[in-house]
Amino acid sequence: MIDKAFFELNPTRSVIAIAGEDRAGFLQGLISNDTRRIGDSSAIYAALLTPQGKFAYDLLLVGDGDRYLVDAESSRRADLLKRLKLFKLRSKVTLEDLDDTFLVVNIFGDGVLQRLGLADTLGTARALAGGLVFADPRLAALGARAFLPRGTAAQALLDLGFAAAAPGDFQRLRFSLGVPEGSHDLIPDKSILLESGVDELHGVDWQKGCYMGQELTARTKYRGLVRKRLLPVRIVGPALAPGTVLTIDGKEAGEIRIADSDRGLALIRLEHLDAMTGSGADADGAHVTASVPDWVKLPEMA
């Protein structure tokens, strides 16, 4: 249980800027959420999909005057910028890598939003210490995320009374909550949004109109085609590598997506969910049990 408020610099995420008078329309046809909800006081969560409707990139977007600041995966931001440039065509849009300017910081723990002067609303945002901060638009328990100037970010948060977390604490929190982030959790060209919880985490707008990959996403929802879900797991025993198959009575019940010590995420076949949340499964000398977070809506619960 977190009884303090912490911050952790996040080297796996970086900031890019999308500016220009056509930025809203440009992104509206590409991402899974509605760009009309992005503002200086509001952030959103969204995904950019492949034309076939599979996961490509996960994004957090917030307004900053005449531009959007976008939180993207550090190791893949060059690929993201390259892909966005391919779609730009004649749109009046500029793209800029701001990794040298801003650090991405996770802020989590007790009373985080109140300490930061943020309303208790998903995605609410404001200026902070030469950058900006916003309530995580996915899930309240994730706290807040900030884009702060390099060189002053840590001291600014220490001055505000936040303590430095141990490296990896935020990832372990995410795992316990079952929230995926980045290409280790969501596999490019393979993962499906509705199997990964992106809908319940407010990353899909069903009224916004067409965007790249929308057809598969809509078909998956309205035809009830979700047969697997990405869920948090607890592991007792040796560490398990991504891709480790979980079996029950000789049948495949799921697959480890990512793990850190005793916590991780696994893609679980719903037909084996009761067994996985009960007695669990064995794999490579370890015992694995799954859980269903409160925010997850399984097909039977929808």
Image (spheres, helix red, strand yellow):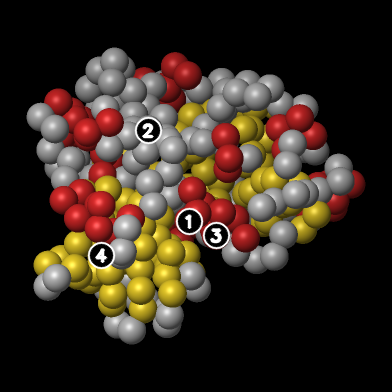
Q: Is residue 146 left or right of residue 97?
A: right
Residue pushed farthest right? 159
**Badge 1 is on which residue?**
175
Quadrant location of residue 300? top left
* Numbered mark located on residue 20 in the image: none
**In terms of depth relative to the viewer, which is nearer, 269 or 104?**
269
| Mark 4 vs 2, N-terminal side | 2
- Identify the secondary structure beneath mark 1: helix
Q: Mark 2: few, some, or many residues within 10 Å (few <14, many ≥20)?
A: some
**Badge 4 is on which residue?**
255
- Identify the secondary structure beneath mark 2: loop
Q: Is residue 280 left or right of residue 181?
A: left
Q: CA distance from mark 4 to mark 2?
A: 21 Å
Q: Quadrant of the C terminus?
A: top left
Q: CA distance from mark 3 to mark 1?
A: 5 Å
**Badge 2 is on which residue?**
200
Question: Tag 2: residue type?
Answer: Glu
Residue beneath the point at 76% across and 30% down: 114
Residue beneath the point at 37% across and 33% down: 200
- Identify the secondary structure beneath mark 4: strand
